Image (cartoon, grey):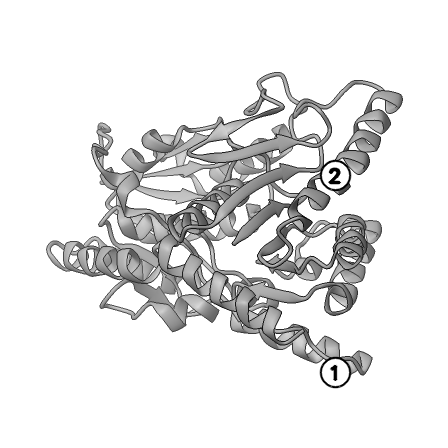
């Protein structure tokens, strides 16, 4: 089978959660004997220290290409428009090449842009190529969005059932959402595959636990997008009231986010017990931080945003062998068992979350739960098994056309 992986929310080959997820999808497809190509339709690098600099290449056996001709955004409106024009001319050529193998060619879109969804759909329809769309979050409940952003997200979800030949979702909540949307519009819902987070146990070979002056906990996330969750963690850490441990928060943070974090630390009188790693942390170093931690934190809430998510970091947390503290919400509650493979708190209470951290810090018990969690992640979230499910799903989708 031939797969073209594309989308508007990741760079390649370097990046954060979305890039890592699409890389594991591609790696899994390769392990299943499929041919894979990644094409990025947008510029992804605008800062002074770009994570990606090559317009095309091969990474881990995965050919990739920036349709804009470069990952680095050009200055000025004209330069940006030229890059977008180049992408819109190049992508049909790549799809036409895929069509030459139309009995097995499939386009997989991982993103949330209504514009690109419609664009790919039109070309896939013309070229008789199935379009499979990944959805991993319910963006309508993400705080801080403008009216325009909310309208675009609503258009994406509303029209997804019209444009996709198949939908891959990360949670039961999202599966039900799209079934409801299809019914409300009086149209048939495309086939849906519910998948999970992905991991690669082989990446942990040779990882050495980080060493710090004092024992520590880790919370990792995009701190700009999940400042509310970090605030929750800080309150739980304050309620924990143990002077023996530090907290390390890892993730991208704008100057505004850093100021908000500093204000929280001052209000909670946490002083120098919280460390912030807001720069890009290479994967091996990040894994070392996980492996050296006393516990790894991933709070969720009793809201639609958390119900729709399944944080990718949880699989890597678990592969470290260290105890994971999360919340009994959504997919986490379905896959993990409190006191067996993780420590799961009732959502909404920093005090309840702090109590679960105390359990995770209990000698021997935390180690045992962490070890069982590692076994579960390696068997359940392995990228190769999930890739087989995807290829079977595509085969079924084709047979239903």
Looking at the rendered structure, the secondary structure element under dot 1 is: helix
| Mark 1 crowdedness (10 Å alpha carbons): few <14, some 14-19, many ≥20 | few
Does residue 339 appear to the left or right of 96 in the view shown? left
Q: Which dot, 2 or 1, sits closer to the camera?
A: 2
Q: In which quarter of the view is residue 158 placed? A: bottom right
Which residue is identified by label 2? 93
Does residue 305 appear to the left or right of 351 in the view shown? right
Which residue sits at x=84%, y=32%?
A: 85
Asked if the residue under mark 1 is in contact with the one under mark 2, i.e. CB atoms within 8 Å, the reply is no
Does residue 227 appear to the left or right of 322 in the view shown? right
Residues 241 and 94: in front is: 94
Q: Total label count? A: 2
Which residue sits at x=37%, y=65%?
A: 352
Which residue sits at x=36%, y=60%?
A: 385
Q: In which quarter of the view is residue 136 placed? A: bottom right
Across and down, in percent, residue 379 comes to: 27, 60
Which residue is identified by label 1? 183
Asked if residue 245 can be seen in this view, the reply is: no
Residues 25 and 321: in front is: 25
Across and down, in percent, residue 250 comes to: 44, 36
N-terminal of the pair, mark 2 or mark 1, is 2
Residues 288 and 33: in front is: 33
Q: CA distance from mark 2 to mark 1?
A: 36 Å
Does residue 21 appear to the left or right of 64 in the view shown? left
Asked if residue 11 can be seen in this view, the reply is: yes
| Mark 2 crowdedness (10 Å alpha carbons): few <14, some 14-19, many ≥20 | few
């Amino acid at each position: 089978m031939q797969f073209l992986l594309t989308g508007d929310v990741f760079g390649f080959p370097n990046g954060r959660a979305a890039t890592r997820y699409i890389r594991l999808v591609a790696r899994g497809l390769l392990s299943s004997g499929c041919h894979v190509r990644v094409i990025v339709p947008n510029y992804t690098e605008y800062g002074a220290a770009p994570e990606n600099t090559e317009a095309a290449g091969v990474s881990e056996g995965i050919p990739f290409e920036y349709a804009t001709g470069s990952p680095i955004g050009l200055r000025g409106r004209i330069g940006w428009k030229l890059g977008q024009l180049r992408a819109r001319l190049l992508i049909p050529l790549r799809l036409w090449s895929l069509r030459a193998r139309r009995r097995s060619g499939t386009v997989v879109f991982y993103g949330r842009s209504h514009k690109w969804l419609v664009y790919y759909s039109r070309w896939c329809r013309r070229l008789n190529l199935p379009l499979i769309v990944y959805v991993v979050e319910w963006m309508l409940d993400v705080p801080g969005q403008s009216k325009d952003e909310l309208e675009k997200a609503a258009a994406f979800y509303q029209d997804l059932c019209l444009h996709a030949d198949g939908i891959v979702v990360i949670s039961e909540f999202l599966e039900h959402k799209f079934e409801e949307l299809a019914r409300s519009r009086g149209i048939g819902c495309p086939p849906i595959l519910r998948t999970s987070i992905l991991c690669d146990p082989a990446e942990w070979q040779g990882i050495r636990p980080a060493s710090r002056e004092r024992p520590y906990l880790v919370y990792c996330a995009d701190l700009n997008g999940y400042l509310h969750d970090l605030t929750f963690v800080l309150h739980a850490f304050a309620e924990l009231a143990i002077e023996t441990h530090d907290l390390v928060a890892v993730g991208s943070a704008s100057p505004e986010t850093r100021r908000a974090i500093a204000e929280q630390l001052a209000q909670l009188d946490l002083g120098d017990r919280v460390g912030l790693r807001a720069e890009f942390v290479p994967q091996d170093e990040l894994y070392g931080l996980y492996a050296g931690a006393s516990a790894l934190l991933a709070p969720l809430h009793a809201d639609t945003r958390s119900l729709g998510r399944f944080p990718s970091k949880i699989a890597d947390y678990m592969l470290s062998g260290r105890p994971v503290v999360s919340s009994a919400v959504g997919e986490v509650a379905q896959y993990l068992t409190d006191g067996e493979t993780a420590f799961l708190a009732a959502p909404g209470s920093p005090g309840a979350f702090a109590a679960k951290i105390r359990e995770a810090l209990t000698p021997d018990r935390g180690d045992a739960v962490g070890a069982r969690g590692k076994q579960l992640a390696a068997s359940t979230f392995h990228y190769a098994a999930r890739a087989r499910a995807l290829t079977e799903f595509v085969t079924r989708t084709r047979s239903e056309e």
